[in-house]
Amino acid sequence: MRARAESNPADKSSTLKAMAKVLDESLGRASDAQSVLIRALAETPEDGDLYAEIDRLAAASGGYGRYADALEERATSIFDATMPRTFGDVSARSPKRI
């Protein structure tokens, strides 16, 4: 599958968007299209158009739970990635107490 072969996140996201378009428009599989776009969101979370399209597909397929789970996972991964750095920054500035 071409999406797996892509190493550049933007290229992978473009491939996934094209797959989602075929799933939704040609095959009428809105739920599957939403799942594919959620994968694209993991690659390019800065792509604002993805959020609107995933929301539209969630409405069409009743997939708001899946969308909420993906957003929660994304938020958790961001928090987990910044926590050690943030904690390290704070502890470096804090005076040592004995």
Image (spheres, grey):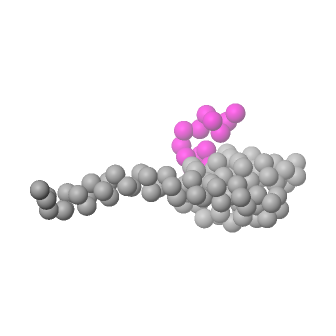
Picture quarter with the C terminus? bottom left
Looking at the image, which residue is at 76% across and 51% down?
33
Magenta segment: does it hold 62? no
Looking at the image, which residue is at 23% across and 57% down?
91
User: Can residue 98 be spotted in the picture?
Assistant: yes
Residue 61: x %, y % from top left: 82, 58
Quadrant in which residue 56 is drawn: bottom right
Picture quarter with the N terminus? top right
Residue interval drawn in magenta: 1-14
Q: Main secondary structure of the magenta part?
A: helix
Residue 50: x %, y % from top left: 65, 60
Residue 40: x %, y % from top left: 63, 50
Depth order, front residue of 80/29: 80
**In the shown orientation, is residue 58 left or right of residue 84?**
right
Residue 15: x %, y % from top left: 67, 45
**In the shown orientation, is residue 83 left or right of residue 4?**
left
